[in-house]
Image (spheres, rainbow, N blue to C red):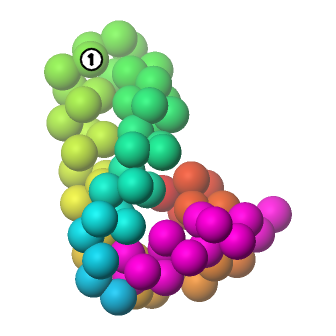
């Protein structure tokens, strides 16, 4: 599945350095990522939040390499 047009625009803007576009991506996906990390960390929400934050930091740095062949959430 590929990106929907609205998300594709956000990703393109964020990849170009638009922090507000990246903030919108974080807002849209942080709940999912935090829940996923909480399962991985067996309920340790503090550790899960740290891992989610690290994932978003790494995503910000790697975003210019995102090819859009899958949904942003899948790539994240």
Q: Residues within 10 Å of mark 1 (few under 14, many from 20)?
A: some
| 40 lies above or below 52 | above
Relative to 10, 69 lies left or right: right
Residue 3 appears in the rendering: no
Q: Closer to the camera, 9 or 48?
A: 9
Question: What secondary structure is marked by label 1?
Answer: helix
Residue at position x 29%, y 28% from top? 48
Q: Position of residue 61 (x, y in %)?
A: 26, 75
Relative to 76, 20 lies left or right: left
Residue at position x 23%, y 45% from top? 53
Residue at position x 18%, y 21% from top? 46
Q: In what quadrant of the picture does the N terminus appear?
A: bottom right
- Report the residue that reaches farthest toward the right: 1
Circle 1 residue: 45
Whether 5 is among the magenta residues is yes
Q: Position of residue 29 (x, y in %)?
A: 47, 44
Q: Which residues are magenta?
A: 1-15
Q: Position of residue 76 (x, y in %)?
A: 48, 57
Whether 4 is among the magenta residues is yes
Residue at position x 39%, y 44% from top? 27
The answer to which quarter of the image holds residue 64 is bottom left
């Amino acid at each position: 599945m590929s990106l929907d047009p609205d998300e594709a625009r956000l990703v393109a803007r964020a990849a170009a350095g638009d922090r507000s576009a990246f903030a919108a991506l974080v807002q849209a996906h942080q709940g999912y990522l935090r829940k996923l990390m909480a399962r991985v960390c067996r309920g340790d929400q503090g550790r899960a939040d740290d891992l989610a934050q690290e994932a978003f930091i790494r995503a910000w740095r790697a975003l210019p390499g995102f090819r859009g062949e899958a949904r942003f959430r899948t790539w994240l």
